Amino acid sequence: MCGIVGYVGNKQATPILIDSLKKLEYRGYDSAGIAVLDGENILVRKAKGALKMLEQRIANETIKGTLGIGHTRWATHGEPSDINAHPQTNISGTIAVVHNGIIENYAKLKEWLQSEGVVFRSQTDTEVIAHLINYYYEEDSDIFQAVLAALSRLEGSYALAVICSDYPDRIICARKECPLVVGLGNGENFIASDVPALLEHTREVHFLDQNEAAVLY
Ligand code: GLU
């Protein structure tokens, strides 16, 4: 189990992500991380340990950006560590992914991506998703199609959220076997693994269906 959150709107994303993660900490607490897009670049901050370790890590910096994703992890593949914490990214850091679930065929995909020249940094199954999206994005340069193409290669379970620095206005999310809820606000939208993380912001929630994907603006 892990907790996923996401925010897109016109408020600063970081405090909203951290607050929402607090409400999901029961889902995982061996490490936590956020990725915030400032309109141009994705800034990733992660820390092993409880969420307060991440809070301490970012306490003295201003992380600007009105769009972001966050994760509180309960490791299945790869020990709890800063590197294995989510978000996981592609090599250039232009695509960031948070994931709840298990990619059963990750070893095969990893081997194939390595044969394509990809150098892996973590031991997670999740990292293959970031590199797969990157692979299809290089072919097609449509991030939504690239995510769908990557998902079509995955066996196993996932709820995930993806951001890409070329698309500073949107979050892409999808689920299979793991829960994901979209919260609709006024000029802002949210995602979370579970409703309590959304209630402070909106009562209008939509439970993503099995195999459903969504783009949040
Ligand atoms: N399999 C992923 C990892 O180990 C996500 C874990 C989970 O959802 O529990 O990082």
Image: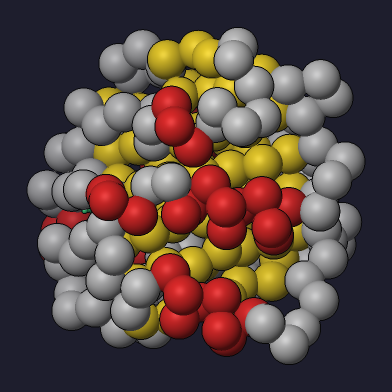
Ligand 1 quadrant in view: bottom left
**Snapshot quadrant of residue 216:** top right
Which residue lies at the image location 29% right of the left edge and 65% below the top edge? 29
Vertical placement of 119 versus 96: above or below? below
Vertical placement of 46 versus 197: above or below? below
Of residues 84 and 59, which is closer to you in this image? 59
Q: Position of residue 140 (x, y in %)?
A: 63, 40
Tally of numbered tags = 0
Is 53 left or right of 66, judged from the image as shown?
left
Vertical placement of 148 versus 166: above or below? above
Q: Quadrant of the C terminus?
A: top right
Is 96 left or right of 175, judged from the image as shown?
right
Of residues 123 and 33, which is closer to you in this image? 33
Residue 162 visible to an observer of this rendering? no
Q: Position of residue 196 (x, y in %)?
A: 44, 32
Of residues 207 and 156, which is closer to you in this image? 207
Vertical placement of 64 versus 12: above or below? below
Of residues 6 and 148, which is closer to you in this image? 6
Is 16 left or right of 29, judged from the image as shown?
right
Identify the colour scheme used: secondary structure
Residue 6 visible to an observer of this rendering? yes
Which residue lies at the image location 57% right of the left edge and 85% below the top edge? 57
**Snapshot quadrant of residue 212:** top left
Q: Position of residue 166 (x, y in %)?
A: 78, 52
**Snapshot quadrant of residue 61:** bottom right
Which residue lies at the image location 35% right of the left edge and 55% below the top edge? 25
**Looking at the image, which residue sits at the far front?**
200
Is 103 left or right of 81, judged from the image as shown?
left
Which residue lies at the image location 84% right of the left edge and 46% below the top edge? 11
